[in-house]
Amino acid sequence: MSHITNFIHQWAPPGIKMSYDNVGLLLGDPNAPVSKILVCLDVTEPVVDEAIDKNCELIVSHHPLIFNKISSINPTNEEGRIIYKMIRNNIALLTAHTNLDAALDGVSFVLANNLGLDNLQFLDKSYNISRKISLTTDYDDTEAVLKLLNYYSAEEAHFYEVDGRKDGQKNFEAIIDEHYVSQLRNALEKEGLLKKGSFQVMEMSTPTNNFGMGVLGFYPDDGIAMKEFLHLVCRALDVPSLRYSGRAERIKKVAVCGGAGVSLKRRALKAGADAFVTADIKYHDYFIEKPNFLLVDAGHYESEFPVVEAIRKELAEAFENVEVESTENVTNPMEIYVTEFENKNI
């Protein structure tokens, strides 16, 4: 279990989640063995029943089952019934939510790839979590120190001799994401490399390139016509209809954000996007402030569900001895009724 948790956390570190969110190993023994995993978007009772039928020891979900603190666990309500059933059947739950939204190759990257976009980059790069660390030590094995820094995803790691200091002291510098700093500090302390005043952490004015929200991508040449683009979105996400507002003659530069991402609309406009695909758009957000811009609501479930297969594939490739399946259950709670109108000649 711990190897799988560490793998997910390397991809989507818990430290980059939104403050309100609840991610990580929410249920289960971190040291328990795992031979089969079921991946899903939402943890519902049918999904848990599926995991039981398939003898899965772990469910990996995008949406957390447990958001708020709970005072009791019993089968008298839906949440309690699901948790109770998972505990009784020794099924653990690992969740990657807003941390996977913000990760490189996370939810919005998967959506952009499904739409056939190229040259992908973060739409919102305001995650200012990069830190510069400085370590002064007389440790002789410089390669071992650099290897330790690289293990915690440090970038631009280097060292130089400290002039005017005794005992051949060296100064190591690197760029590291904030959520790795405490882990690195603990590792340095364990190896005896920390002395009072020898380790410093400094904020940086430039944002990280490893995390952000939403994605900006491009279609080649002159792009595609608006009707063709809408049809492409429907086909890629397997939906029969879309809500949209605005118009754009040609779609070349596209912004996307899986799930409820309309708060990034201004970012999309500022980036010069011809279209923005997201979900959960409210009425007043459909009004467009500029011409030649298309705003598309593809549905929350529909825009995020492709990440389930992406998680399954990543886990299957990383753990060859573990069987990994995507859920067969459609957990979308929303249904659409389309009525048939009679054509009357007036």
Image (cartoon, rainbow, N blue to C red):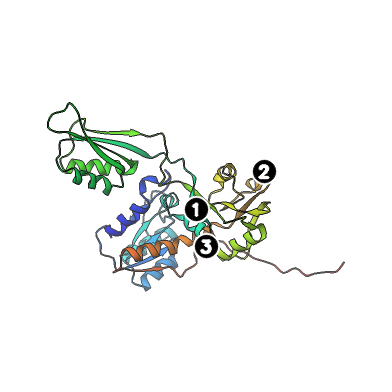
| Mark-to-mark CA distance, 1 and 2 | 25 Å
The amino acid beneath tag 2 is Lys
Crowd around label 1: few <14 · some 14–19 · many ≥20 (10 Å): few
Viewer-side label of 3, 2: 2
Q: Residue furthest bottom?
A: 53
126 horizontally vs 334: left or right? left
The C terminus lies in quadrant? bottom right
Q: Image quarter for residue 53? A: bottom left
Report if residue 29 is visible in the image: no
Query: What's the mark number on residue 290?
Result: 2
Judged from the image, the secondary structure of the residue bearing numbered disc 3 is loop
Q: Is residue 220 above or below residue 172?
A: below
Query: What's the mark number on residue 119?
Result: 1
Disc 3, disc 2: CB below 8 Å? no
| Mark-to-mark CA distance, 3 and 2 | 33 Å
Which is more N-terminal, label 1 or label 3? 1
Judged from the image, the secondary structure of the residue bearing numbered disc 1 is strand
Q: Position of residue 96 (x, y in %)?
A: 39, 54
What residue does disc 3 label? 332
